[in-house]
Image: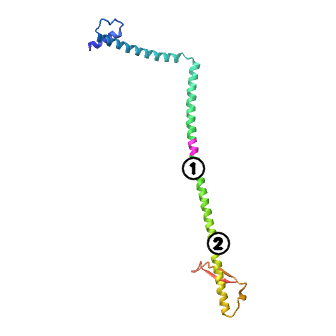
Amino acid sequence: SLVGLCVVKAARSLLDVSSLPPVLQQQVLQLREWRSSQVRKRLLTAEKISAQRKKNPEQRQREKDEADVKAVVETMVRKLERAAESEQRRVARAETVKAQRWAQKAQQREERAQQREDKAQQRAEMEALRKQKMISLVRYIVALGGSEEMLAEWSVKFEVRQEGATAGRYDDVFL
């Protein structure tokens, strides 16, 4: 609008706006304030750039070196963190394997103990069977007219058949 254009022109110039209507005076003053804040921002940015340019080459190099060192340190920290995580996983796997081995050894010990018990029970059963066979032999010899003293040094041996249809069965051998 024409009024807006006049306000902008008046704000850009340094003309006295006291002769303008109060609404326009207020708009011009607000626009001038806004423009001056924009100019201040530009000046501050320009001052920062200028200050960086004014730094001596040694200071700029030092800042660049510091940034490079920071980047290298951050990279190394990330690598160390990954390595630590990897080591933790490796240790956890090793501990799991160790626990599995301990459990396996414990199971093997239990199995060996069970086998020993089974063998001891088999021996006891075989000894009871030997005694029973000897008692049967003594009764038979006595029934035929012999005496128990005749069989005092005799023993029973069981031989397992290795071949044929009856393999795995045993024979009683009296010695």
Residue at 60% x, 53% y: name it.
98
Where residue 172 appears, as percent x and y from the top left, is 64, 83
Report whether 39 appears left or right of 119.
Answer: left
Residue at 55% x, 27% y: name it.
67
Where residue 56 appears, as percent x and y from the top left, is 57, 17
Which of these two is toward me, 101 or 163? Answer: 101
Q: Which residue is mark 2?
A: 120
Local packing at callout 2 (Cα closer than 10 Å; few below 14, some 14-19, many 20+) is few
Q: Secondary structure at mark 1?
A: helix
Where residue 97 appears, as percent x and y from the top left, is 59, 53
The disc placed on residue 148 is none
Where residue 42 appears, as percent x and y from the top left, is 43, 16
Q: Nearer the viewer, mark 1 or mark 2?
A: 2
In the rendered image, residue 85 lying in the magenta stretch gets the answer: yes
The disc placed on residue 93 is 1
Q: CA distance from mark 1 to mark 2?
A: 40 Å
Residue at 59% x, 51% y: name it.
95
Report whether 173 appears left or right of 88.
Answer: right
What secondary structure is the magenta-colored segment mainly? helix
Q: Which residues are magenta?
A: 84-88
Report whether 166 appears left or right of 23.
Answer: right
Residue 145 lies, with reference to residue 34, above or below; the image says: below
Among the 4 quarters of the image, the one containing residue 32: top left
Q: Secondary structure at mark 2?
A: helix
Identity, as a three-letter code, of the amino acid under mark 1: Arg
